[in-house]
Image: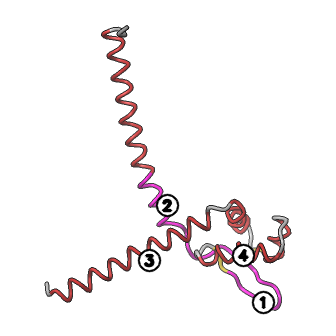
Amino acid sequence: MPACIAKARSLIQNHMVQYRGARLDLSFAALSDATRRGILEQLGRADASITDLAERFAMSLTGMKKHVRVLEEAGLVATKKVGRVRTCKLGPRQLQEETAWLERHRATWAARFDDLDKVVAEMKQRETTHGRKK
């Protein structure tokens, strides 16, 4: 493979990794706040205006707009302005990448805990077989 093609492929792959990482960062930052998670739960039931969301969460319109903007930047919420009302709905992203990332790490931790369980069981077996040392 010519060097220029290999370099181009490397740059494309590096960009994809950085982009994917940036998307994960935006998603997890958006999901790190309890109010934003609550907004997503609310929008999962029905679309709502920013005013309705602000009232439901007992916060100012400015505060709610900031939360919605963070969710929108992460692709988790989409808004549409009709007249003076901005309506929010769940965005196009369905968190597949985030779920896959969490699952990979959950599997790693589960394997580590399984290994720890085996070590503890072996230690208990040795104590039972050989008795405790005093």
Labels 4, 2: front one: 4
Residue 94 colored magenta?
yes
Does residue 72 appear left or right of residue 109 in this picture? right
Q: How is the image coloured?
A: secondary structure
Q: Are marks 1 and 3 in contact (CB under 8 Å)?
A: no
Q: Earlier in the sequence, mark 2 or mark 3?
A: 3
- Extreme left residue here? 1
Q: Which residue is mark 2?
A: 99
Measure the C-alpha gap from mark 1 to mark 2: 33 Å
* Dot 2 crowding, Cα within 10 Å, few <14, some 14–19, many 20+: few
Q: Quadrant location of residue 128?
A: top left
Residue 111 appears left or right of 69: left
* Residue with the mark numbered 3: 19
**Residue at image location 39% in from the left, 36% down from the top:** 114
Residue bounds of the magenta highlight:
79-105
Q: Write down the residue under mark 1.
A: 82
Secondary structure of residue under mark 3: helix
Q: CA distance from mark 4 to mark 2?
A: 25 Å
Q: Tag 4's secondary structure?
A: helix
Foreground label between 1 and 3: 3
Distance Cα–Cα, label 4 vs label 3: 23 Å
Q: CA distance from mark 2 to mark 3?
A: 17 Å
- Which of the 4 quarters of the picture holds residue 76? bottom right
**Looking at the image, is mark 1 or mark 4 nearer the viewer?**
4
Mark on residue 66? 4
